[in-house]
Amino acid sequence: MATAADLAALLSGRLTGDPSTDLRRVAPLADAGPGDVAVLFETPRARLVRNQLQTCRASLLVCGDPMAFAGATLVVADPRRALVALIHALQPAPAPAPGVHRSAVVEPGAVVGEGTSIGALAFVDDGVVVGAGCRIGPGVRLLRGTVLGDGVWIGANSVLGERGFGYLPPNADGVRDPIPQIGGVRVDDGAHIGALCAIDSGTLAATWIGAHARIDNLVQVGHNARVRAGAVLCGQVGLAGSADVGEGALLAGQAGVVDHRSVGAGAVLLAKSAAFRDVPPGTVYGGTPARPRTQWLRERATLSRLHRAGTEGSTDDS
């Protein structure tokens, strides 16, 4: 529990209202009641937000601009960052205790850094190196050749270091023999990898996840791929072998990059887009095949107009 004055000091905000108000949790606008803090991200112009403000019973409203509210208000520079700080202050999640869960398996040849937590039913293979302060979720598999830096987080049931998907052309019997994948996986400091992700071993050099990259659940990173520092891969993104995602790039949900193609630094690949060619740095691409967003949107609009023109006056329902 904290007072409104405590939170104003924490967030360097401007408080209007009773500074001694006790606050215990953060709650949505629609559900907040006495003792709660509500955070407003949007401007109050939208009708829904205005209605919620009129009926909200929170004791404190955190917002980006001054506004009329029945309770106390705290104006801050960035409400979204304020939300994170409020949750940490009022409802901190219990940190997993350092150590290895009794049901996890850490092979004798693995090296695990100080302060690392390894969850239930996880497996850490011989030759794996795990840095200090990592969080390895339940059911995670870290296979031979995987090296994690410090402070890496890996969500439940992800697999790092499985053999990459590489095969020779069919032989005389029509069988594709597998290509050995011995390069392993390297994850640099502070990267976060969600649940149920698969990051394959490289062929000769490591598949690489850069420092402070953010990878959502259900993401596939193929062998030899590179996800550079600060890049973001949203849910169900797929990178084929040797794809290269630049620093700070963002791939929205279900986007894909074919093998040996790159997404430049700071570029954005929109949801469900497929990059068959390189995406230049700092650009926004969409569609399949991916092309500049403005071009893609113009093409979609043109197709829509052509479709409407072709169906006007038609009575054929077949």
Image: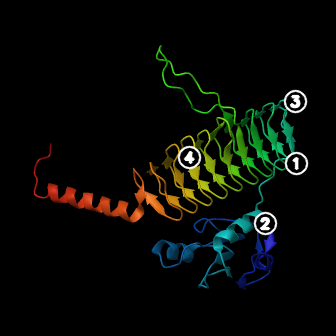
Q: Quadrant of the C terminus?
A: top left
Earlier in the chain: of badge 2 and badge 3, it is: 2
Q: Which residue is mark 1?
A: 115
Cα gap from disc 4 to disc 3, whole angstroms: 34 Å
> Going by the picture, which residue comes out furthest to the top?
173
Left of 312 or right of it: where is 100? right
Earlier in the chain: of badge 1 and badge 2, it is: 2
Q: Amino acid at mark 1?
A: Gly
Q: Amino acid at mark 4?
A: Ala
Q: Amino acid at mark 3?
A: Pro
User: In the picture shown, does residue 203 fall above or below 53?
Assistant: above
4 and 1 marks in contact (CB < 8 Å): no
Number of other residues with Cα within 10 Å of mark 4, as a class: few under 14, some 14 to 19, many 20 or more:
many
Indicate which disc residue 108 carries: 3
Left of 189 or right of it: where is 132? right
Q: Which residue is mark 4?
A: 243
User: In the picture shown, does residue 29 fall above or below 218?
Assistant: below
The quarter holding residue 7 reads bottom right
Mark closer to the observer (1, 2): 1
Q: Which residue is mark 2?
A: 89
Q: Residue at x 36, y 63 (%)?
A: 295
Mark closer to the observer (2, 3): 3
Q: Quadrant of the N terminus?
A: bottom right
Looking at the image, which is closer to me, 3 or 77? 77
Q: Residue at x 49, y 47 (%)?
A: 256
The local secondary structure at tag 4 comes to loop
The local secondary structure at tag 2 comes to helix
Mark closer to the observer (3, 1): 3
Looking at the image, which is closer to me, 189 or 61? 189
3 and 1 marks in contact (CB < 8 Å): no
The local secondary structure at tag 3 comes to loop
